Every structure is written in structure tokens, then in C-alpha cells.
Image (cartoon, helix red, strand yellow):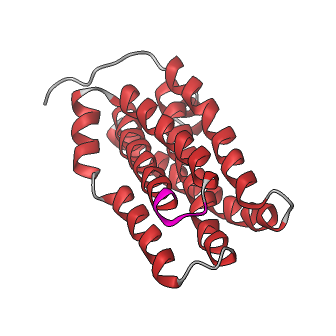
Amino acid sequence: RDLPQLLRDPSVRTAIASVVTAHMVMVGLMQMTSLHMHGLAHPLTSIAIVFSSHTFGMFAFSMVSGWLADRWGRRPVLGLGATITLLSCLMAPLSPELLPLSLALFLLGLGWNLCYVAGSALLSDALAPSEKGRMQGFNDLLVGGAAAAATLIGGWVMAGPGGYTTMGLLGAAATAPLLLVVARLPRVRPAPA
């Protein structure tokens, strides 16, 4: 199949939407958190703690995420990841204190992980071996572009009157449609290996 044919496949579209949205939202909020904390006069040690908890959320549970995606199916794990990402975006601006920010950024990393692992598995499931390289390359192009856009827009948003609160709300608003996209994906349980 060529690229337009691949993009008509609901599984391919859902996988790409999940991975791109999760990455864009995660990068957008994460990269402005250090500026937000610096503006609140947090010491560098506190900023490092928040980013350590975020990185832990992003990577520590990857094997569990993969196991859940195989056991429960791609769709439920994508839904869980999108829900956690949305909640983390709403939580992050609520308190300037270290512990709530650490928890919110941990959840942002965990939501990203669930979406990225399940979305990547869904994309791989939907492709023939001869289609994987081209489509995964296209997916990576979109992921990188979304991250770059989130970084550029994030600086502009943080300079505005709403600042970090607006960043969180925009992240939640960008994630909410993903719940609908995932809900519309037909229920398919992966066959056991």
C-alpha cells in the first residue's frame, strides 16, 4: 500500500494520532516546567527531582506497558495512557509545590509511555513487513515535527498572561480528542504468540 492507502486504515491513523499527540503534549508541558519552576524560585535540586520523576515515568514501566498492550489489547492501554496524560496536564498547574509537580510530571511521563508503547505496537500490527520502514519513518517525522511545534508554541504561550496554566489546559485540550479517536477504534485483541 502507498502512503494515502495506509493513512485510510483506522488502526494506522489511531496509532499515529496516539503517538504524535502524546509526544507533542508531553514535550510541550515538560519543556516549560523547568522555566515555570525557575520562575517560582525553586532551586535546581527541586527541578532535578521533578525531571527525575518525569523520566522515571517515561521509561521505568515500558516492559509493563508492553505486557499490558499484549494482555489487554492496544486500545485499552491507549485509552489509559490518554486519560493519564490528560489528568497530568490538568494537575501540573494546580500547585507550585515540589511534590504535586513531581507527581504531575511523573504521570505525564507514564501517560506518554502507555500511549507510545501501545501506539507503536498498534502501528506495527497494522503494517505488512514491506510497509513498516516507510510508515514508521513517516510516523517519526510527524512525532519530531509535533515536538518542535510544541516547543515553539510553548515559549510563546509561557510568555503570555496565562503562562503555565495555559500550557496545562492546552495539553489537556489536545489530549481530549485522542480519547474519542481511541474509543472509535474497533476492539481487537492481539492473538497470543
Quadrant of the snapshot with the C terminus: top left
Residue depicted at 57% across the width and 47% down the height: 91
Q: Does the magenta portion include 121?
A: no
Q: Nearer the viewer, residue 159 or 100?
A: 100
Residue 66 percent location from the top left of the image: 26, 42
Q: Quadrant of residue 115?
A: top left
Q: Is residue 91 above or below residue 34?
A: above
Residue depicted at 61% across the width and 44% down the height: 90
Residue depicted at 52% across the width and 24% down the height: 10
Q: Nearer the viewer, residue 92 or 136?
A: 92
Prevailing secondary structure class for the magenta stretch in the rendered image: helix
Q: Quadrant of residue 72?
A: top left
Please say whether residue 9 is visible from this viewpoint: no
Q: Quadrant of residue 80?
A: top left
Task: Tell me where the magenta segment starts and ends, as one range.
Answer: 96-100
For this orientation, the residue located farthest to the left is 193
Q: Is residue 13 above or below residue 31?
A: above
